Amino acid sequence: MRQAQSNLLTRVAVLATLLLAFGLSATSAHAAVPTTPTNIDTVPTGAQVFLVAGGQETFQGVTPMKLFRLPRGTIQLKFKKEGHDDLLQTIGIATTRQTLLFNLVRTIQPATIELTSAPEFSGAAIEIDGKAIGPIPSSAKVSPGRHQVVVTKDGYGRWERWIEATEGQRVTFDVVLVKSELPKGEILVSSNPSGASIMVNGAPRGVTPAVIEGLTPGPYLVEVSLADYTKASQSVVVEAGQRAKIDLALQKVKGDTGEIKILTDVDDAQIFLDGELIGKAPVTQANIRPGTHQVEARTARGFSGEATAEVRAGEMTVVRIKMTQTSPPDKGQVRVISTAPGADASLDGGEFQKLPTTFSDVAPGSHVITVRAAGFANWTRTIQVTAGSTEEVVAELGQSGRVEVSTKDGTRAELFLNGKPLGRTPFTGEVPAGTHSLLVQRDDGKQEEFQIAVGVDRVVKVTAAFGADKPQPQAVHRPMPFSARALSQGTGHASIVASWPGWPFPLYVQAGGGVGWGFDVNVQFRTAFDVINEFEGIVKWTFADIKTLSAAVELGIGGGLGGNDRNSFVLRPRVKGSLMIGENAAITAHVGLLYHTDRLGPEDKPETKDRDAGLRLYLGLDLEFRVAEKVNLMFSIQGDPVGGKRALYEESFLDDPDPKLYFSGGVSFMF
């Protein structure tokens, strides 16, 4: 027992000695590095504080920290808080107590842009703000704000979006690319001799010379054939937006004799073959014996030329003679050709001549050639003619629209289209399709300028008031009588409409026309035979009309008479809205009210003494479409979903009650 107690006392003494030594050591160490009580806080609070020394971070506490003892001198503190950027600060700790406050910056969370697509678009290149990201599908981190996203792939149109990304947002797009349509190409096909039938990939395309337009880029087989000549063909590759050219020489079917064709650069030249006159150039002579022949060309104006021709059996020999003028060469010639059918040309505003033609005895200097053809814009060029030479002009006409220009006061004025002379008012003619600047200038110098949009299927009318009314050019639209677009001034229609199964009127007849300023006027006659026959006058005003949409209000007033002393009065206001599909169709929705007051029979009978009055709400949808140049078809459905019945309709010859849902269809004739 004593031994155990002795051992316990010994252990306690040793432990006390160790604790005392450790305390003295700590006191000594603490005394070696003096400290200063310091208040430490952050905005926001709750940040972890670390003392950084020797590359090590020692945790000190969490803000706010009150009277925390920090070693004196220059030290580094690091602050960490979730959702904020780490902050490392170097500070000096003096001998006096101080308070330190630090602002933490919140960590901005990036947004994510993710792009996916169908397999056919995989590999498309992605750019964000002009920086390549990689192929689709892909995603990228971006800072909050506005970003441009572009996706491109060969053979497809550019896909682009602007994105307003917010912090931490994930924006996903399923990209759909649209294939790029390459510009069409064309082929200029000519032959010797001309007038040969053209086949392109087995389809007939006119006769030579001709320009085959609207061809999808790719390979084509062009064949030309002409009676008494062997067929010729050639393969050609059409490139986007380019014109390929083919000139095929046709070979005459061989026989015992040959043919000779003589061409000159002067149209009125007389041709002599072996001294015998055979006609005016160009001329072809058949049944020529094989061998050498002498060809001579002469004109009354002193031009002459000659050549030697070697004719072979079964073949055509083409001789081209360049003529010279033996008299003083003080005049020139202009030869004009065109690919447009039925074209004619004028020199310096003179008489028009059918093409091809040659203008002779043209004085040297500048001259204006004008070429015109139905359905094409007039073609004008200024050329330089030199004495003793022939200038060849090829006119390629483009599609056109019709323009009518006048002045309000009837005075004459000069017209300039895109700065070039067009003519004088009153003017009616063809100009190239597209947008143009039209300047109308009176003889006194006063001007008025218009911007006009010319289309192939419309007439643009311009009236210059020179400041009086500031009129605008008006396009004459093809009539759609039942749409919200008012008929153009000078156009009209007559329409017949039948209802099925006969409600409320089996047959309608309507006619009307445009009066200008967005108004048209119509008269409608509808019949239910001996029940009632009504006339109604209708005025429509189009208050909004853009390229594809029109809106209008319509007011109809009318009345009618029928058997058994029946009579009626109707007032019909209505609002219409139409989707215009070019000049070919219209889809029209309308809503309107029908106020009616009807007498159903003799006034002296008690059951029909009082008039039947009421108000009905009509909703409807009409479809009109063009089937010929001056013919439309129309289908309509309308009904009264909420209103009461009109007693007059119950007098119908039909056995069934009024269905309150009406179907109709008809035909319109335009003029």
Image (tube, grey):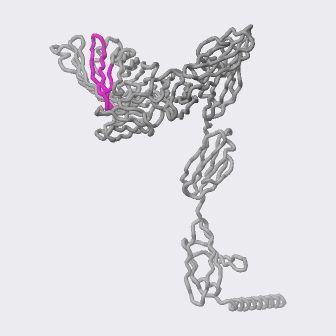
Q: In the depicted view, which residue is nearer to us: 279 or 76?
A: 279
- What residue do we see at 72% from left, 77% from top? 55
x, y (%) of residue 210?
A: 60, 23
Q: Main secondary structure of the magenta part?
A: strand
Q: Position of residue 177 (x, y in %)?
A: 61, 40
**Residue 589 in view:** no
Query: Image quadrant of residue 45?
Result: bottom right
Residue 270 x, y percent position in the rendering: 59, 16
- The picture places residue 263, in percent across and down from the top left corner, at 63, 20
Residue pictured at 49% horizontal, 22% vertical: 353
Toward the front, the furthest residue is: 327
Relative height, residue 646 to residue 159 (above, below) = above
Q: Is residue 292 visible?
A: yes
Task: Work out which quarter of the rendered image holds the N terminus and state it.
Answer: bottom right
Q: Is residue 375 magenta?
A: no
292 vs 174, nearest the viewer: 292
Left or right of 496, for residue 561: left
Q: Nearer the viewer, residue 430 or 348?
A: 348
The stretch in magenta equals 511-540
| Horizontal arrangement in the rendering, residue 606 relative to residue 270 (left or right) | left
Q: Which quadrant of the view contains residue 262?
A: top right
Assign the C terminus to one quadrant of the image: top left
